[in-house]
Image (cartoon, rainbow, N blue to C red):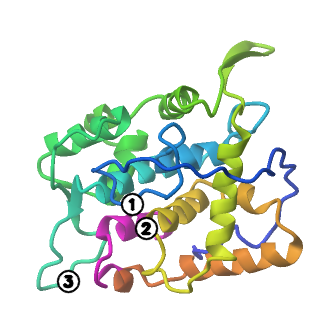
Amino acid sequence: MNRSDGLVQRRNIIRENNEGAPKETTSSEKKDREEVEEGDSKETRLTLMEEVLLLGLKDKEGYTSFWNDCISSGLRGCILIELGLRGRVELEKAGMRRKGLLSRKLILKSDTPTGDVLLDEALKHIKDTEPPETVQCWIEYLSGETWNPLKLRYQLKNVRERLAKNLVEKGVLTTEKQNFLLFDMTTHPLTDDITKSRLIKKIQDAVLAKWVNDPQRMDKRMLALIFLSHASDVLENAFAPLNDDDYELAMKRVRELLDLDFEQESVKPNTSEVLWAVFAAFTK
């Protein structure tokens, strides 16, 4: 499959609440986060998982598209990248035969808790698994998409709901009950327009005004956010408000990122091998 499939057609998505300038505030950095965007307040500092989910949520309805079957595995990819960026996991050494990213096992680097329940649950599974598994396997296990019944115990359940509750606690979403004829469903409509507007603008700027044309110079979290938003089929939501020219340019630059040689990028200095392995798993 071409890595840039799905990026050619522009959908007609009605976006609301996409205006409003972000208000920058200062805050102390968390020690275990390798990179924190300057200006985020403590209340609205989001993990990769929370950012991807927020992009996928309908603002007023408070739920993701019923037709999106990609976001589940995409969120698990976010979890692995978060653990990698926080120094909790790494890939085994490539060895003299230079094993590829998808052949190398994900191994524990530190079992120090992150303070995030989902991350710590995944970290415990990785710690308890012997022999180690590959990144591709862990995405399948954490998603519950495995044919091996012995691995189903590794599934992270109710991830979207748990992430939505995190966003409620951070004041970004609220909680409501909606009736869908045959059943009631808990939804989480948007309450903080500024946080989502800032997220969308941050992604737009990364591929337009602040484009650096070198993935190694890009912020690792932003690079991960672009890739995992695409893998989760929610990246379109960030680009829908753009005018036609900017939209085409943004998509062109995303395609350039998707078409990179991940193996080659992963051996460059100061990179994150886990990050590139997750990218490879979604574009193999």
Horizontal and vertical percent position of residue 89: 23, 55
Q: Residues within 10 Å of mark 3 (few under 14, many from 20)?
A: few
Residue 274 is inside the magenta segment: yes
Identified at 57% across, 64% down, the residue is: 226
**Residue 173, above or below 44:** above
Look at mark 1 in the image and give the residue it sits on: 35
As drawn, is 49 to the left or to the right of 187? left
Q: Residues within 10 Å of mark 1 (few under 14, many from 20)?
A: some
- Looking at the rendering, the stretch of residues picked out in magenta corresponds to 266-284
Query: Which of label 1 and label 3 is nearer to you?
Result: 1
- Mark toward the start of the polypeptide (3 vs 2): 3
Identified at 83% across, 49% down, the residue is: 15
Residue 167 is inside the magenta segment: no
Horizontal and vertical percent position of residue 14: 87, 49
Of residue 192 and residue 87, the one placed in the foreground of this image is 192
As drawn, is 240 to the left or to the right of 113? right
Look at mark 2 in the image and give the residue it sits on: 220
Marks 2 and 1 sit apart, C-alpha to C-alpha, by 8 Å
